[in-house]
Amino acid sequence: MDKKSLMIVALACVTLGLQGKDGVQLRRNQVGCYPGQEKVIVVEGANPGKNVKITTPDGKVLKAQSVRRAVSPFLGKKRYVVDLGNLSATGDYRLSFGGESCVLHVSKQPYHDIATASLRLFYLIRSGVPIEQGGAYNRPLGHPDTHVLVHNSAASPLRPAGTVISSPLGWYDAGDYNKYVVNSAFSIGLMFAAYEQQRAYFGTLKTNIPESGNATPDFLDEMMFNLRWLMTMQDPYDGGVYHKLTTPNFEGFIMPKDCKQPRYVVAKSVTATLDFAAVMADAARLFEPYQKDYPGFSSQAAAMAERAYRWAKANPTAFYRQSQLKDPAVTTGEYGDGSANDEFFWAASALWRLTGEQQYLDEALQRQPQQFTTPSWGNVASLGAIEWLAVEGQEARAKCEELRTKMLSQLTDYCDNAIKGVEQSSFQSPYGNKVSDFGWGCLSESCCCQAMLLLYADKMIGSKKYQRYALQNADYLFGRNATGYCYVTGFGDYSPMHPHHRPSEADGIEAPFPGMLVGGPNPGQQDKKDMHNATYPSNVPDESYIDAMESYASNEIAINWNASLVAFLCWLDALAE
């Protein structure tokens, strides 16, 4: 067995909980907690009774006891929830039981470093420029994308197949090296939603990027790097937006500079065009105060957004169908969607906020959702709902009060439903209690996005009703879960070392890029047939995770997943202010 296979087996043992003596495992938030945050751990392997030992930062010894038994809804496994009590002094607390010990960090800013890393990750995955401020992760330029071909599926009279266009910059989408409009626009839109509610926080957050030091917040500078690429994806002759910029097939696990396949822009789609319209409308508003660094951008973005919307209205059934692409065929990420109702709702909502025009309000009223859903690239209706909740100004709110009230009611219902049953859950958290909580990208859509919405609801209703539950999702994400992993690279005691991420695998550096959220437990195990050096340790939904490079179904990274991490963690970090 080779060294890499041995490491994967060892990590699988950690996943199965074999690291503690006597089969005992202490599951806790490995990153840290606020002084006033609820402090709970979960013990597996034995009932600790009153015997969890706590050594405080000043050397005092305390005891904590289990407050209830929790039974896994998936396998009947018994666990014990232990309330550590009021550990409000900052510092490190050592917890011990059953031959295992670990440290719980209590800090006034426990989430600052991990929040900053989650945002800085976007700098590390920039395309088309050399990475020169990445420390050990510096790399030369790859994929300049100044010679991109128009695929025959994207051809138009003024841009026939084979036309060469320039489409540089942007972020690599996931574990691969392609760039997808649907996911890029969704990712920016999700982060914009958090930015709008925490502008003061983002205004001072520094991420050490080339633009740091200008008059614009680093957060917006990073968004601009991807927005500039998105702008190149609109056909200047008709306003439609290409679905993606891609190679015909995924590249191997090589560095960007070594990639040789030709790059294409492929078919315009109604979903990509509407997502583009929405995010450009929002960007036009949010960049208005930063004309010094980005002169003329807001007016250009506004015009492009409206033009894209007109194209979508004229082509409402132009859905992306990858199987129809030929010469060459394309096999990379599809981001396919058979309904554009949610995209129309988001785009109309964003354009109304930008322009105040009645046509957009009418469209939004026609397309409004009947319930609040967790945001995802395939269902952006909640991003449209958030647009209405974020409307500022008495006059503007009066014009859309009915819609705002309805969206707030739907959000409140969503949050109240999310927190049901926490006191009986396996890991004292809203997330992780149903089979449907687990699947492709579940730690993003089901965990981080849910938590961000809980915080958003608190902001909208002026309470702290849901904050406790959002923090519980952070506890789950950072180690109080069935595998014992902190699911963000570079943080915690047990974090992924082998994500399905080409540059992290090919750069010769042992540690992956820090600040990446992996997809998480996925009982579908769609990659099982393709894995040769690793095997899933379990089929149980919340244990169906393997830290192996081959596991694209459980261990890949993606910009939309990291966008949810940024929205959630930066909001948590803002609570410290």
Image: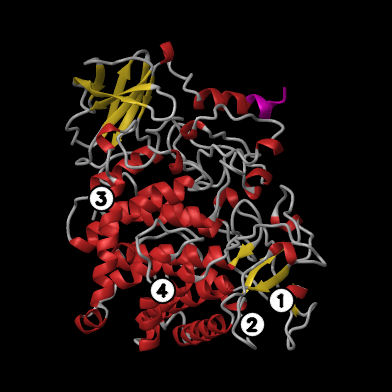
Image location of residue 531, percent across then percent down:
69, 35
Picture quadrant of residue 193: bottom left
Q: Which residue is mark 2?
A: 235
- Which sits earlier in the primary sequence, circle 2 or circle 1? 1
Q: Are marks 2 and 1 in contact (CB under 8 Å)?
A: yes
Q: Are marks 3 and 1 in contact (CB under 8 Å)?
A: no
Q: Are marks 4 and 1 in contact (CB under 8 Å)?
A: no
- CA–CA distance in space, label 4 to label 2: 26 Å
Magenta highlight range = 1-6
**Left or right: 40 as drawn, with respect to 274:** left
Q: Alpha-carbon neighbours of circle 1 within 10 Å: few (<14), some, or many (≥20)? A: many
Image location of residue 146, percent across then percent down:
71, 74
> Relative to residue 161, is residue 531 depicted above or below?
above
Callout 1, which amino acid?
A: Ala
Q: Which residue is mark 1?
A: 154
Q: Which residue is mark 4?
A: 367
Tell which residue pokes out farthest to the top in this image: 22
- CA–CA distance in space, label 3 to label 1: 45 Å
Q: Which residue is mark 3?
A: 416
Rendered residue at 49%/87% (across/down): 303
- CA–CA distance in space, label 2 to label 3: 44 Å
Observer able to see residue 150: no
Between disc 2 and disc 1, the foreground one is 1
